[in-house]
Image: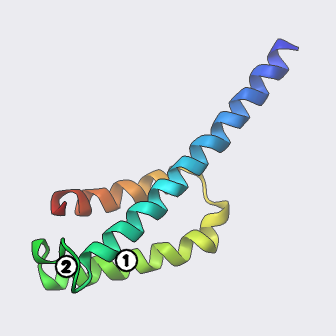
């Protein structure tokens, strides 16, 4: 019984981690997109071509979240979030 309980707890933790990564990616995407638009507070900290490319990438990922992202793994979410933070965190 103990092994079965441990397996269930592990599966529950995986689901919670997946949800947290998904929520973090979604929140970060929306935050960066709104702050990088023409009236946002970050727009002056990223050059125009890089800013437009980053916003386009954010738009692709936001669409992905509600399509293929519904069944994506934790690793995919973590990878996309890390890629965004590599660009977005220095801007912040």
Residue furthest top in the image: 2
Determine the image quadrant of residue 30: bottom left
* In the displayed structure image, the side of residue 72 where residue 55 appears, left or right: left
**Real-space CA distance between mark 1 and mark 2, rounded to the nearest whole angstrom:** 10 Å
Q: Mark 2 points at which residue?
A: 50
Q: Quadrant of the N terminus?
A: top right
Q: Quadrant of the C terminus?
A: bottom left
Q: In this view, does 10 lie above or below 25?
A: above
Graded by Cα atoms within 10 Å as few (under 14), some (14 to 19) or many (20 or more), the crowding at tag 2 reads few
Q: Mark 1 points at which residue?
A: 57
Residue 32 % position (x, y) = 31, 69
Graded by Cα atoms within 10 Å as few (under 14), some (14 to 19) or many (20 or more), the crowding at tag 1 reads some
* In the displayed structure image, the side of residue 79 where residue 85 appears, left or right: left
Q: What element carries label 2?
A: helix
Determine the image quadrant of residue 91: bottom left
Which numbered dot is residue 44? none
Does residue 70 show up? yes
Q: Is residue 78 above or below residue 6?
A: below
Residue 8 % position (x, y) = 78, 29
């Amino acid at each position: 019984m103990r092994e079965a309980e441990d397996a269930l707890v592990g599966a529950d933790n995986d689901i919670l981690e997946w949800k947290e990564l998904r929520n973090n990616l979604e929140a970060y995407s929306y935050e960066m997109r709104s702050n990088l638009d023409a009236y946002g507070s970050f727009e002056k900290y990223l050059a125009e071509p890089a800013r437009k490319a980053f916003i386009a990438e954010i738009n692709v990922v936001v669409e992905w979240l509600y399509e293929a992202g519904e069944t994506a793994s934790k690793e995919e979410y973590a990878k996309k979030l890390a890629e965004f933070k590599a660009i977005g965190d220095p801007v912040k």
